[in-house]
Image: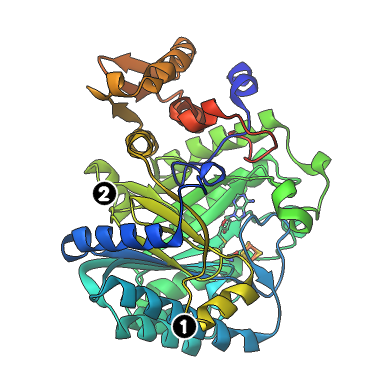
Amino acid sequence: MSHLIQKYNIPGPRYTSYPTVPYWDQETFSNAEWMSTLKKSFDESNEEEGISLYIHLPYCESLCTFCGCHKRITKRHDVESPYISAVLKEWALYCDLLGSRPKIKEMHLGGGTPTFFSPQNLKILINGIFELADKADAYEYSFEGHPNNTTKEHLQALFDVGFRRVSYGVQDYNERVQKAIHRIQPFENVKKATEAAREIGYTSVSHDLIFGLPHQTLEHVEETILKTKSLRPDRLAFYSYAHVPWIKGNGQRGFKDEDLPSPNAKRQQYEEGKKLLTKVGYKEIGMDHFALESDSLYQSMVSGKLHRNFMGYTASKTQVMVGLGASSISDSWYSFAQNVKSLEEYERLVGDNVIPIYRGHILTEEDRVIRKHILNLMCRFKTAWGTEESFFPEISLAKDKLAEMEQDGLVVFGIDELRVTEKGQPFIRNICMAFDVLLHRKEPGTRLFSMTI
Ligand SMILES: C[S@@+](CC[C@H](N)C(=O)[O-])C[C@H]1O[C@@H](n2cnc3c(N)ncnc32)[C@H](O)[C@@H]1O
Ligand code: SF4
């Protein structure tokens, strides 16, 4: 295995979208085109399947030095109200554009730290959203909570407005690792936050774990998994630490590169960690995710409904996903659009009644075909192409690239179809890269992506 790791551990996208953000075409994008494709997609799908809503809440009180998320560190809580007013204003602009009341099937509050905001302000936010929208018949609302500051009041406030799923950032329980990533978070805090969620009636609690962190060893990973098991979260993310200091700057400089485990040690953490998670009862879902058999993510994988978007894996697909808040990305299925990242500019634009998009991409027919293959691979570890092959010669190109992976035992070809083997699953990002024709046409000149392994 180690020679395969050496061979395939290269920079590569995580494919939360296709085309990936660095390959969005600004030339063919305009705000007007984004809005018209969004409206078209909404009219096609809202009645039947509803929409997804992502709300980015960017504040944290303290900086974790490993963090790759878009956040602003502050202890001042007077930032809460103006930010929430801006998000509600942005939502009103979208609802105006859409013309009829959206039915919200999925909603996710991400960050930053949503639980930086007071329970009262979170309630104002969600009630404000529902002044202009309705809940879909079956819905899943979730939020990211920091175990150190998620109170019973937070959990109750969000439960009262329909939230049933919470994910907590855990990362690793070892003290030395926690010190290096500037995140002191005792097991007791996670236990309390997990139990409080269950007592209130949350039906799905998720924990985020990371391997490959500074000073982390295989023993730390195993210990963290065993402690996690004792709390029995319904879902688990088991992320590979994405070290992207050229993007994240100071935030990822709280430790030296030498403090990170070697690629082989990191891969061993992944493999042994995965074995242990499976042994203690978790099923692997696509890339990086695990769930108990009773959880809706597992059930949607079994029924073939699993989907992946900017929020990660989700139990069902909606054609429209609106992202509110600074840096959020929206997806109309025909196009992507991203909001400005600066909080000041975000609040200023929304204050001027402008939907605060600064870049995006209108998908071509070719993009949509390739996106479908990448989604199939990410969600089902297989794809089939039938008659498209002659239409898009690059699919033949993918075949050439994949032939080598077949020799390495990572994939198996059938007639017009491709299946990822168990051995190939850790290399799923590399396999998707074979289909990524935009990447083939123009290799990035500078470092854009984290390592695939
Ligand atoms: C927005 S944070 C979670 C919510 C909350 N702020 C907290 O820290 O508990 C989302 C998750 O992204 C993951 N994450 C952040 N930076 C990462 C990185 N560089 N590599 C891998 N995973 C990362 C962490 O597991 C984290 O829990
Ligand atoms: S890991 Fe969470 S709390 Fe830490 S800086 Fe990132 S978003 Fe904020």
**Badge 2 is on which residue?**
299
**Badge 1 is on which residue?**
122
Quick check: which quadrant has ligand 2? bottom right
Asked whether the viewer can see residue 425, the reply is no
**Quarter of the image that includes the N terminus:** top right
Asked whether the viewer can see residue 235, the reply is yes
Q: Position of residue 449 (x, y in %)?
A: 62, 40
Report helix, strand or loop for mark 2: helix
Depth check: give the residue in front, 419 or 438.
438
The amino acid type, in three-letter code, at marker 2 is Gln
Relative to 54, say whether 430 is above or below: above
The amino acid type, in three-letter code, at marker 1 is Leu
Q: Position of residue 304 (x, y in %)?
A: 24, 42
Which of disc 2 and disc 1 is earlier in sequence? 1
Depth check: give the residue in front, 301 or 437.
437
Q: Give the residue drawn at x 32%, y 38%.
A: 365
Q: Position of residue 256 (x, y in %)?
A: 83, 46
